[in-house]
Image (cartoon, helix red, strand yellow):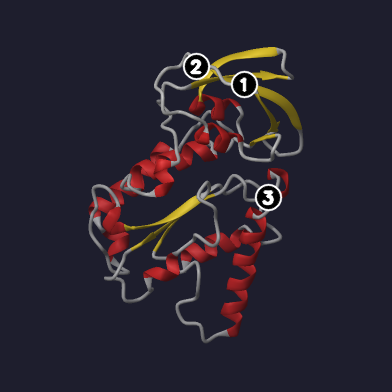
Amino acid sequence: MGGVVARAMLTMPNYLPNSINTIITMAAPHALPPAPFDWEMQRIYNNVNGYWRKAYAAKWANNNPLWHVTLISIAGGGLDNTVASDYTATSSIVPMTNGFTVYTSTVPGVWTGMDHQAILWCDQFRKVVAKSLLEVVDVRRPAQTKSRAERMQVFQKLYLSGLENINQKTLPYGCNLSWRYFADNSTGYGTYCWGCLASKLETGRAFTDSNTWLRDYFETSDTSSSSTSREISPVAFLVLSPDGSKSHKCFATRC
């Protein structure tokens, strides 16, 4: 239940905003309580899950207190006879941009199911978790961790097998596709691959005029060609400040 407690902390009135941005849970029943016979427990689940769903349903990042939070739920599979692994699903709670659920039997380098206790001390799994935590650290940033987009890239690389749909929708950070963007359509900031651009924008929260994610636009554009000389029409988008309070209009074009 520690994973549920961690998520509940973000709903508390004395929670310090932006003090938590990464949650990794092991065999935590996020969707349903493992023993649903206590109405108080059900009320807690309703409140916590309702808060998270409402936050991610917000149209703009400045209306979403969880825009920067990533949630990775790891299940042990059929060997866990304490918490049914179906209860660990987070697909109805967080979008793919902010988290996912994975079974230990599909984690690269682990490839085995685990019971409710073994998931805490299994050596090969413990090493993967430790590596993921170390790779998201960035002491140069105020939060001491990488941006949300970069953290998700690390988690997808280490926890997913590569066959999932979420991986197929993500451009690699080392890709040879680059984008040139301009603030107010005048001042040039140079050329960056998408990974660098996400870091440059800090929050990664940028929207096109049609209110779609800038990242989504980049990823769904024609990127089948490896050539970087092809031009497309500039795309207008809004960039939000790290706290989500301010925005300014920018333009981007593929180089």
Residue 167, x across and y down, in percent: 40, 43
Label 3 to label 2, Cα distance in Å? 36 Å
Q: Is residue 143 visible?
A: yes
Q: In this view, does 161 lie above or below 194?
A: below
Badge 1 crowding class, 10 Å Cα cut-off, few under 14, some 14 to 19, many 20 or more, is few
Residue 212, x across and y down, in percent: 64, 40
How many numbered marks, from 0 up? 3
Label number found at residue 64: 3
Q: Foreground residue, 121 or 228?
A: 228
The residue carrying mark 2 is 230
> In the rendered structure, which amino acid carries the disc numbered 3?
Asn
Foreground mark, 3 or 1, reads: 1
Label number found at residue 233: 1
Q: Foreground residue, 146 or 159?
A: 159
Q: Can residue 133 be seen in this view?
A: no
Residue 209, x across and y down, in percent: 71, 34
Q: What residue is rendered at 70% in x and 13% in y?
A: 187
Badge 2 crowding class, 10 Å Cα cut-off, few under 14, some 14 to 19, many 20 or more, is few
Residue 164, x across and y down, in percent: 37, 49
Label 3 to label 1, Cα distance in Å? 31 Å
Foreground mark, 3 or 2, reads: 2
Please tell me whether mark 1 sits on a helix, a strand or a loop.
loop
Q: Foreground residue, 58 or 229?
A: 229
Look at the numbered discs 3 and 2 and tell me whether their residues touch, using CB distance below 8 Å.
no
Q: Give whichever of discs 3 and 1 has the lower sequence position.
A: 3
Look at the numbered discs 1 and 2 and tell me whether their residues touch, using CB distance below 8 Å.
no
Please tell me whether mark 3 sits on a helix, a strand or a loop.
loop
> In the rendered structure, which amino acid carries the disc numbered 1?
Ser
Q: What residue is rendered at 70% in x and 24% in y?
A: 250
Please tell me whether mark 2 sits on a helix, a strand or a loop.
loop
Left or right relative to 172: residue 254: right
Q: What residue is rendered at 44% in x and 70% in y?
A: 87
